[in-house]
Image (tube, rainbow, N blue to C red):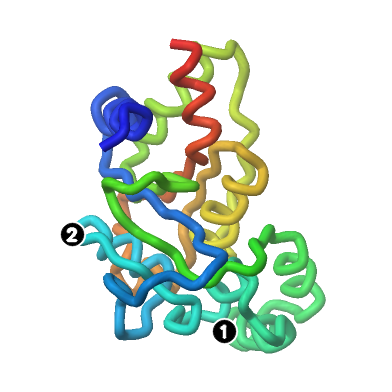
């Protein structure tokens, strides 16, 4: 394990708390060794990654929101119609929400693990752990973290993709589906922090 990775894991799990999963974005084909062979949602994959390391190919992502978040959804209108039907909200509102949610591009697979060199670290953590991270930031930089909360494309778009693209710490309540299916517990929030940002934080310690 590299020194940089060891420092990141130590900081997150010992100084902040919680269990943190590293996620790496692969834009080129990877060996099928370690690839998951059954479809699953990104929010489900994060929970599974607490137990083992694996690769989730984009064609195995079993959620239109997840596919859209990594840039492999062929028809965004289909997602809008699906969310509109599920929520009963006006289609124009859902279109705007989806359009304003960040997404990655040209991702072929997601690599989940606790010992890799990730692009983003994600945790399903308690409010206390999220508080510790926010307080650490406030004390270190004497400023608040700019946080926008969402319950749409909450884990995949507004944490995974957004934290990487903005190089910011992102928090989410999760979405109703991820909670109803038991991937995120009632007492947990979703928190993401890009590895690049974490490097800069640790360099200043």
Determine whether 167 is above or below 56 in the image.
above
Question: Which type of secondary structure does the marked residue at label 1 adopt?
Answer: helix
The residue under the point 75% across, 60% down is: 100
Quarter of the image containing the N terminus? top left
Q: Is residue 107 above or below residue 123?
A: below
Query: Residue 150's quadrant in the figure?
Result: bottom right
For this orientation, the residue located farthest to the left is 51
Location of the C terminus (image quadrant): top left
Picture layout, residue 156 above or below residue 15 = below
Which residue is the site of mark 2?
Answer: 51
The answer to whether residue 1 is visible is yes
6 or 80: nearer the viewer: 6
State the image quarter where residue 145 is shown. top right
Q: Gap between marks 2 and 1, in whole Å?
A: 31 Å
Q: Residue 73: x, y in percent?
A: 64, 81
Residue 168 percent location from the top left of the image: 60, 37
Task: Please give left or right for residue 80 compared with residue 109 in the image.
Answer: right
Identify which residue, 204 or 188, lies in the foreground: 204
Residue picked out by circle 1: 86
Total labels: the figure holds: 2
Circle 2 — which element? loop
Q: Position of residue 33 (x, y in %)?
A: 28, 73
Where residue 113 sits: x, y (%)? Answer: 30, 54
Q: Point out the tag, 2 or 1, that comes first from the N-terminus.
A: 2
Q: Label 1 crowding class (10 Å Cα cut-off): few <14, some 14-19, many 20+?
A: few
Q: Which mark is residue 186?
A: none
Crowd band around label 2 with a 10 angstrom C-alpha radius: few (<14), some (14–19), many (20+): few
Residue placed at 43% from the left, 70% from the top?
30
């Amino acid at each position: 394990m590299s020194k940089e990775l060891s420092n990141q894991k130590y900081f997150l799990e010992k100084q902040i708390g919680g269990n943190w999963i590293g996620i790496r974005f692969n834009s080129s084909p990877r060996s099928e060794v370690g690839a998951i062979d059954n479809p699953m949602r990104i929010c489900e994959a994060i929970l599974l990654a607490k137990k083992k390391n694996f690769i989730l190919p984009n064609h195995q992502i079993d959620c239109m929101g997840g596919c859209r978040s990594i840039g492999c959804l062929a028809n965004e209108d289909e997602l809008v119609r699906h969310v509109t039907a599920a929520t009963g909200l006006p289609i124009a509102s859902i279109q705007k929400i989806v359009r304003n949610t960040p997404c990655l591009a040209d991702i072929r697979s997601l690599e989940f693990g606790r010992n890799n060199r990730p692009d983003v670290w994600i945790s399903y953590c308690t409010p206390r752990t999220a508080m510790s991270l926010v307080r650490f930031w406030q004390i270190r930089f004497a400023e608040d973290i700019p946080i926008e909360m969402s319950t749409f494309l909450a884990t995949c778009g507004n944490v995974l993709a957004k934290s990487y693209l903005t190089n910011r710490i992102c928090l989410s309540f999760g979405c109703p589906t991820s909670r109803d299916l038991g991937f995120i517990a009632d007492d947990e929030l979703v928190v993401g922090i890009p590895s690049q940002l974490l490097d800069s934080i640790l360099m200043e310690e």
